[in-house]
Amino acid sequence: NSSYKKKEDKKWSQEINRTKVEKDPIFILGHWRSGTTLLHTYLTLDPRFAYPTLFQVSNPHTFLTLEPLLKKSLEKLNDKKRPMDNVKINYDSPGEEAFAIAMMSLKSPLIGWSFPRYAEYYDKYFTFEDVDDEEFEKWRRAFELYVKKLTFHHKKQLVLKSPSNTAIVQHLVRMYPNARFIHIHRNPYKVFSSTLKLYKTAVPLSYLQHPPQNLEDRIIKQYDLLYHAFLNGKGKLSEQTFTEISYDELVKNPMATIQSIYQHLHLGGFEKARPLLEKKIIESSNYKRNNHAGIAPEVIEKINSRWGKYFREWGYTLRGANDETLTRTGGQDDAESFTTTAESFRKAS
């Protein structure tokens, strides 16, 4: 990696540094397992937009050099299902730029996924409120460099999706004053159940130490931290640059929901993207949904106590600790939408 990084820096660093981001990115915001991946998939069907691939976020220092060398081998690999759901991915699937920036800066809450015993230490990088100027500048420079590098490579407007960005909208809008922001929210009980599965399946693949046994409390605290910062920061966004949708809206009527995003944010060109969206909905009609275990009554009480204001913010109903639908099943994950949207599209057609 170090050798290839030296070659890549020598060959392209000057061009990357000179690259101008003509159109600020479109940022998708929302907690993990809220439907951000589905929304990212739909929006990036538009050929006017680009996104960082899984390969590019995994190799931020070297992807310009390594991807051409490995492309034929990577294309031969079979698609794999993500550990936490049935979404198929390959090296070229949309990725989260936060993983790249975590490697480039070492200033990210995602590092807590590898060192779970120190996760609370890395939580300060959710908002950067308690970090010094030098640390913040290191993160900011890494972020802006990576966006320039992606722009240099793709030469298109970027659509970026990282749940951790939800807590730093006030920083992002300063860095990219003309950026567009889309927040997607989902019933918090379902988010909790699906995030718990994420922490039991996908996150352990990154562990470099044994985690503490308090996943439920960790998720509850993290959600509160993320959305407390978001509600404080979204006042920095203008009505013309920010829109908010629910996961249920996207599932029930994806075409109308995506069209409304285009209209609200004045993105233009929806009719050219429509056929690609229609095709994707139909292709995904056989997607199999996941079910999750129920939520224990004592955990429901904690969720209601810590997350009550977020239920009210988006109009979700608080349930009792002994509600059968919550203690029996936590609901289906965000991948269920591929089946539901296909059915709704067929009926609409």
Image (cartoon, helix red, strand yellow):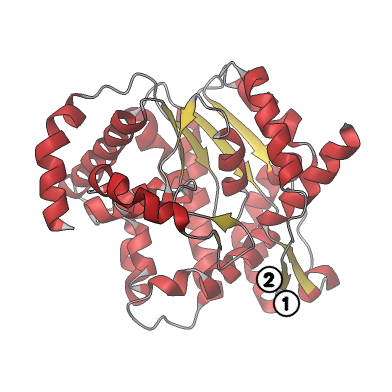
* Residue type highlighted by circle 2: Glu
As drawn, is 195 to the left or to the right of 164? right
- x and y percentages locating residue 33 in the rendered image: 59, 56
Along the line of sight, which residue is nearer the eye, 296 or 246?
246
Residue 117, picture quadrant: bottom left
Along the line of sight, which residue is nearer the eye, 347 or 202?
347
The numbered disc on residue 301 is 2
- List the single residue furthest toward the right: 347
Q: Does residue 127 show up?
A: no
Q: Which residue is drawn at 72% across and 48% down?
A: 284
Q: Which residue is drawn at 33% across and 63% down?
A: 111
Along the line of sight, which residue is nearer the eye, 86 or 128?
86
Q: Which residue is drawn at 60% across and 17% down?
A: 269
Q: How many marks?
A: 2
Q: Residue at x 70, y 54 (%)?
A: 187
Q: Which residue has dot 1 on it?
A: 297
- x and y percentages locating residue 7 in the rendered image: 12, 46
Q: Quadrant of the N terminus?
A: bottom left
Look at the picture and state if 66 lies above or below 221.
above
- x and y percentages locating residue 153 in the rendered image: 31, 33
**SS at mark 1?**
helix
Q: Does residue 348 show up?
A: yes
Few, some or many residues within 10 Å of mark 1 (<14, 14–19, 20+): some
Asked whether the beta carbons under mark 2 and mark 1 sit within 8 Å of each other, the answer is yes
- x and y percentages locating residue 342 in the rendered image: 79, 44
Q: Quadrant of the C terminus?
A: top right
**Distance of mark 2 from mark 1, alpha carbons?**
6 Å
* Residue type highlighted by circle 1: Pro
Few, some or many residues within 10 Å of mark 2 (<14, 14–19, 20+): some
As drawn, is 84 to the left or to the right of 321? left
